[in-house]
Image: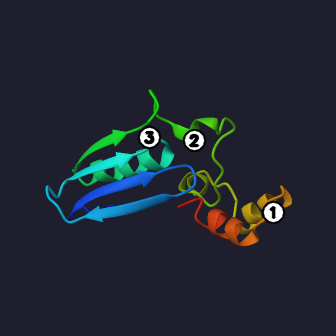
Amino acid sequence: RTLPLGRLAVAFCGASCCRFAMATVFPADQAIVVGGGLAGMSAANTVLEHNGKVVVLDKSSFCGGNSTKATSGINGAATKTQKMKGIDDSIELFTNDTLKGGAKKPEVVKVLCGNSGA
């Protein structure tokens, strides 16, 4: 997600979800990101890409969160890299593989797989 920089943005990032709480205080080009996992670092990077200033806070002495447990990689389908390298993949294939792997909530699988290459 792109963080609006018209207000001070505070992103609460965690393993289960990422919620954004906006405050109507200034300065307008600064953000505090709580959580140094993949979602938190992505939020911080977005702020920096928009020439903002950001502070990342994490409860651990190192960043990474649960993303560090993804030792075999982070799965995605129809990514920019796959397209650039001519790798034939689709969201449908990824969804079917995930369901075959034992996922119990097809509606959640559809959303996660559908947004995985974004």
Which of the labelled discs sits on residue 36, or is there none? Answer: 3
Cβ–Cβ under 8 Å for marks 3 and 1 = no
Q: Secondary structure at mark 3?
A: loop
Cβ–Cβ under 8 Å for marks 1 and 2 = no
Kind of residue at disc 3:
Gly
Q: Give the residue pinned by disc 2.
A: 67
Residue appearing at x 70%, y 59% in the figure: 88
Whether residue 98 is situated above or below residue 105 in the rendered picture: above
Which of the labelled discs sits on residue 99, or is there none? Answer: 1
Which residue occupies the foreground of this view, 114 or 10?
Answer: 10
Quarter where residue 101 is shown: bottom right
Residue appearing at x 34%, y 53% in the figure: 46
Disc 2 residue crowd, few under 14, some 14–19, many 20+, Cα 10 Å: some
Disc 1 residue crowd, few under 14, some 14–19, many 20+, Cα 10 Å: some
Kind of residue at disc 2:
Ser
Q: CA distance from mark 2 to mark 3?
A: 10 Å
Which residue occupies the foreground of this view, 100 or 107?
Answer: 107
